[in-house]
Amino acid sequence: MSGGGDEAVLHVRELRKAYAVGGGTFEALKGVSFDVHPGEMVALMGPSGSGKSTLMNVLGLLDRPTEGRYRLGGRDVADLTENERAEARNERVGFVFQAFHLLPRVSLLENVALGMVYAGVPAAVRRERARILLERVGLGDKAQSQPNNISGGQKQRAAVARALAMDPDLLLADEPTGNLDSQTGHEIMALFHRLNAEGSTVMIVTHEHDIARQTERTLHLLDGELHDDERHAPTLPDAVRARLEAPDAAPQGGVAA
């Protein structure tokens, strides 16, 4: 489902989001505008209360803006019905969450294939694609394992494979290393870098400056406004660079104590 050409994957103009609070209104987003183009790797940062989570929910079609324009993969999403939004969310946005959100009692293969079930992909096709995606993230030998029997790093790799199942326009990762120890976090960031080098458009929502510095661009939110749009050369930790130079290295690590 990935978009092609130079058209922006995300086209955001004057997005506003207001909530009724008590007898008044709280404006979580105050006219945010930016574009993200195919193949970019972008960090979204901001302190608690900055509007970061609200913006992520709007971009991921989990919530609607109060005002403004949002085009995802060239498609204006403002007038989509709830069913159309659910379809677009499943096919155009690949979510990776801090808490993994894998179904604990089914295999990794079935977890990865789940989104394809909703999209009506034939069983044989979705199983083969899920197998290929698990191999792509270094879990080809874990296809029949259940999430409860693997490490935190392997769970996050499986979650990334699931996010890629429908070839989305955007890979949207919310604090993807937050539940991992530092070594495993480096492995997951190396995976994102490899996917980005292969053409995936990646947005990482993070509060960690060392994660943001690994991207080529950082969007800083403050009090519901885009405070800064900083473009910079990525700075990769030695551990991440080492993983990229040894792409076939076996995954290690787990959930931080």
Image: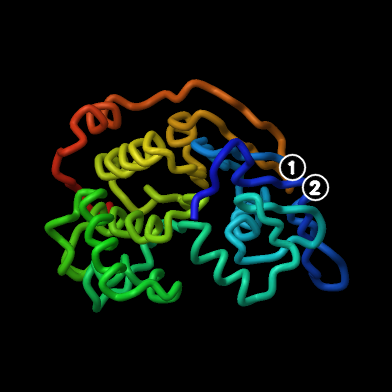
Q: Are marks 1 and 2 in contact (CB under 8 Å)?
A: yes
Name the element at disc 1. Answer: strand
Residue annotated with mark 1: 33
**Which quarter of the figure is the C terminus placed in?**
bottom left
Task: Please name the amino acid that badge 1 sits on.
Answer: Ser
Q: Quadrant of residue 127?
A: bottom left
Residue annotated with mark 2: 14
How packed mark 2 is, by other alpha carbons closer than 10 Å (few <14, some 14-19, many 20 or more), is some
User: Residue 127 — which label?
Assistant: none
Q: Is 209 or 91 nearer to us in this picture?
A: 91
Q: Horizontally, is 187 left or right of 61 in the view? A: left
Q: Position of residue 50 (x, y in %)?
A: 67, 48
Name the element at disc 2. Answer: strand
Q: Horizontally, is 206 left or right of 236 in the view? A: right
Residue sitting at 52 percent across and 51 percent down? Answer: 169
Q: Position of residue 193 (x, y in %)?
A: 37, 36
Q: Is 156 or 72 nearer to us in this picture?
A: 72
The relative height of residue 155 versus residue 148 in the rendered view (above or below) is above
Task: Please name the amino acid that badge 2 sits on.
Answer: Glu
Q: Position of residue 172 (x, y in %)?
A: 49, 51
How packed mark 1 is, by other alpha carbons closer than 10 Å (few <14, some 14-19, many 20 or more), is some
Q: Horizontally, is 141 left or right of 95 in the view? A: left
Report how far apart the C-alphas of labels 1 and 2 lie in the structure.
5 Å
User: Is residue 173 visible in the rendered structure shown here?
Assistant: yes
